Each structure stands twice: as structure tokens, then as C-alpha cells.
Amino acid sequence: MNYSDTLSKNTQATVLVVDDTPEILALVTLILNRHFHVKPASRADTALSIIESEIRPDIILLDVMLAETDGYALYRQLRAKPETMDIPVIFLTARDGIEDQAHGLALGAVDYIIKPISPPILLARVKTHLTIRQTQLLLKEQNDRLEQEVKRRSEELELIQDITVHTLASLAETRDNDTGNHIRRTQHYVRILAETLRYHPRFQTALNDDQTIDLLFKSAPLHDIGKVGIPDRILLKPGQLDAGEFEIMKTHTTLGYRAILQAECELGKEVPFLRFAKEIAYGHHEKWDGSGYPQGLSGTDIPVSARLMSLADVYDALISRRVYKLGLPYDAARQIILNGRGSHFDPDIVDAFVAVEDTFKAVASRYADPVTNETTGVVRSHCLEDSESLA
């Protein structure tokens, strides 16, 4: 039960008085008893039993010189326990030296009252520190409520963000209905690669924290959002695309980038997860040697997010079953990725892929596409067309 609850149910705060001198214990009890619920204790063990009871004291008056132990030792015990460390303590002592008072206050006591006890001073100081205690607890409760509300709203906003991303990605997926769990697999591949490379000298600036990697994971499903702008005659064409059709297919990168950029412009500010989404949508078909599209970027001019997505996207296209082809065995897909080291893909990202290949396989197994007997609605993967020349 916290202090504000005590006040609402019982106007008398609880004061624990610990002193092994019977006369002092009786005097302090008499002074405070009209205003507070007083619990006297002449021994440290008795005081500890009271303190550890269901209803803890709101403040403790503690004699510095107890018979079986000094008050400082008992105070240190209280400070060491999370459940009692915040109970305010006022030291009672006959020692009136500045050093003694400084020592008690340095330990963390809220006050230091010199014996012989002055009733008005004792009562005034206890009331003052109880008022402070009440204010502190009320502020803590308000802060706790505020933190919970901020957490709730942040979680709600994050959920809305995630739902929006997956809704948009699913919209693209409905146009390209043979991709199955492609977006789920590739976002996990991206996370795995990012986590593997986060402490690599070339990547530690770009992949420097959990939040960045989480944003990459959440942005990855939007890599093919531009497909919604590709005509059905091309997107749903069975078999090989001709040169003109492939040029149109390539525009999905620019279409996706512009759609996300427009959403960001309407928000009026740059949003971190949209920044990564733009990079991934626009650049995941760029190649390390500059032969990719749409900009023909090369090397480190390609954003890290797009380089990660590039390998994840091609790998998944290679191993995935389509109605017009069987998925390649892992070893064959692995060799194609290795063949693209330094030409299609960032060499260090390929090395990271090799290091975590078993984890990639586990993701592919966990999110495998369901087996189907469909013979219509064939979709040609442009990712596969990009990678076939590497075989």
C-alpha cells in the first residue's frame, strides 16, 4: 500500500520510532501519538519485523546508538532492500557534533534531531518530511501513469505502423499472387544479415543499434510495393519477359519509391521507417558493379538497406517454387550468390550470408510456401531474371 492510498483510507500516517532508551521512546510516542499512528521499538530486530510487515511505516525515527547495533548499520540494511530503501529516516542522537550530523545526512537520512527532544521541533519536522514524502509519492504515481500512457500510445502507434506496412505489402502481394510468404522470409533474411554485420567496421555506423535493425525488418516488406503499378499483362505473364516488358517491370522500383516519398511528403517530415522503405524499394535491384537499376549505382553508393535487401530478395527467388519452375536446391542457390560476390552483391554481405546460411535455411523452412496444384495465374519473378545470368 503506498502513501497516497494510506492518506485516502486513513488520515494517520504510520511512524516507527526506534530507541532503546525507554524514557525517550515514551516521550516521542507521546508527542506524536495525537497526530500519527506510532509504532515503538526498542530493538533493531523488532524494528525490522515492523518494517517488513504488510503495512510499512511512512517514516522512521531511528536512534543512532542502539544497544545491540548502531542505527547507521540498521539504516544501511534498510537502504539495501528495494522495498524499504525509499522510506525516509530521521536520526535521533545525543551527538551534536557537526561531523556526526554530516555523516548521518551523507548516508541519506532526511534529517537529524538532537537530544534532548524538543516536542515542537520534533512534531514540525516529522510533519514536514511526511508532506514531502506524500508529494514525492504522488508525483511518482503521476509519472508512472504518464509512462504507462506513453507506452500504451507508443505501442498503439507501432501497431498501426506495422499494420499499415503489412497491408501495403499484402496489396502488392495480391497482384503477384505466386509470392506466398516471400515478404516474410525476406524481412527475416534482412534482419539476420543486419545483426551479423552490425559490428563489422564497414557497417557498424549504419547498423548501430537494435532500433535501426528493427526498422529495417519492418521496412523490408515494402520492397516490391511498386508492383501495384505494373500492368497485369506484364506482371502476370507466364514465362520470359521480352526486353520491352522487362523495362516496364523495372519501373516498379521507381513507382514504389515515389509512392512512399509522396506519403512522407504528406506527413510533412521524414519518418525513419519510411526512409528505409524508400531506400529498399528504390535500390534493391542495384548491383555492386553498377550494372543494376534504376540508377546504376555501384559499391557503397548503394544504401546499406538496399544491399541487404538485394541478396535477401535474389536468394529467396532462387529457392522458391513457382508453377513454372521448381525451387533450386540450397547448394545451387548458394553457389549463385557466391558467383555474384563483388559483381551483383556487396562482398561482405555475401560473406555474412555464408556465415549464417543455416539460419537462412531455417527461415525458409519455417515460412515455406504451401504446396499447390494451381496451373493458372503464373507470375514471372523479375528477381530471378536478374539472377539467372549468375548461374
Image (cartoon, rainbow, N blue to C red):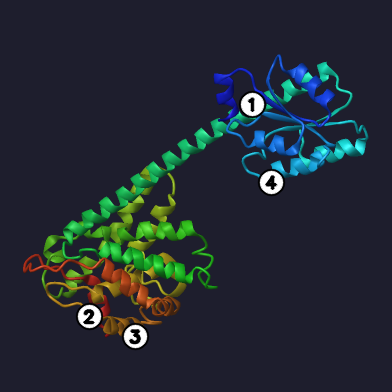
Q: Earlier in the sequence, mark 1 or mark 3?
A: 1
At label 2, which amino acid type do we have? Answer: Leu
Circle 3 sits in a helix, a strand or a loop, which is it?
Answer: helix
Label 3 to label 2: alpha-carbon separation: 15 Å
Q: Are marks 4 and 3 in contact (CB under 8 Å)?
A: no
Label 4 to label 3: alpha-carbon separation: 61 Å
Q: Earlier in the sequence, mark 4 or mark 3?
A: 4
Badge 4: residue crowd in 10 Å (few <14, some 14–19, many ≥20):
few
At label 3, which amino acid type do we have? Answer: Asn
At label 1, which amino acid type do we have? Answer: Thr
Percent position of residue 316, x then y: 27, 72
Percent position of residue 212, x then y: 46, 58
* 151 relative position to 100: left or right: left
Q: Circle 3 is placed at which residue position? A: 339
Q: Circle 1 is placed at which residue position? A: 135
Q: Earlier in the sequence, mark 4 or mark 1?
A: 4
Label 4 to label 1: alpha-carbon separation: 23 Å
Q: Earlier in the sequence, mark 2 or mark 4?
A: 4
Circle 2 sits in a helix, a strand or a loop, which is it?
Answer: loop
Q: Are marks 4 and 1 in contact (CB under 8 Å)?
A: no
Q: Which residue is nearer to you in this view: 74 or 161?
A: 74
